[in-house]
Amino acid sequence: MNKEEFSKFYADNIDKVFRFTYLRVNSAEKAQDLTAQVFFRFWREASRSPKKIKNPLAFLYRMARNKIIDFYRQKKKKPISLDKVQEIADFQAAHTTFQQKIELSWEMKR
């Protein structure tokens, strides 16, 4: 795929891919970032590959889908600070009843 073909393909499909990603991540900024990454990767693969991609639109959507999956995997692994953990523990401890504290201590002894 040469530059002119890619430019036309990009212009024809940028809105479609953005809409596809936006509906799955619910953030315009993240959807723009993911769409840009998808098209960059598509350009890299299309220009590097000696054989022509048979169905470029399907290939593009597959890449977008994979990027969205990667986005949610990375989001899941986001670390939480120890201060936040302590804050949550303090909040939970403050809202437990006396009976719950006794039951908890008995469970810990068992």
Image (cartoon, rainbow, N blue to C red):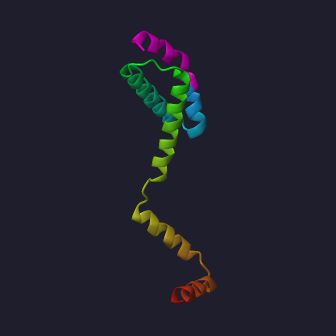
Judge by depth and name the residue closer to the eye, 98 or 79. 79
Residue under the point 54% across and 35% down: 65
**From the viewer's perspective, is residue 5 above or below residue 28?**
above
Region of the chain picked out in magenta, as a range: 1-16
Residue under the point 44% across and 25% down: 42
- Residue 18 image position (x, y, % from top left): 55, 28
Residue under the point 50% across and 67% down: 88
- Screen quadrant of the C terminus: bottom right
Question: Can I make out residue 26 in this image?
Answer: no
Answer whether residue 11 is magenta in the image: yes
Question: Can I make out residue 87 in this image?
Answer: yes
- Residue 31 image position (x, y, % from top left): 52, 34
Q: Which residue is farthest front?
A: 51
Answer whether residue 32 is magenta in the image: no
Q: Which residue is farthest top?
A: 4
**From the viewer's perspective, is residue 5 above or below residue 104?**
above
Q: Which residue is farthest left?
A: 48
Judge by depth and name the residue closer to the eye, 36 or 52. 52
- Residue 57 image position (x, y, % from top left): 55, 22
Residue under the point 52% across and 39% down: 68
Judge by depth and name the residue closer to the eye, 62 or 23. 62
- Residue 75 image position (x, y, % from top left): 48, 49
- Screen quadrant of the N terminus: top left
Name the dominant secondary structure of the magenta segment: helix
**From the viewer's perspective, is residue 92 above or below residue 9?**
below
Query: How many numbered badges does the structure rendering display?
Result: 0
**From the viewer's perspective, is residue 24 above or below residue 97?**
above
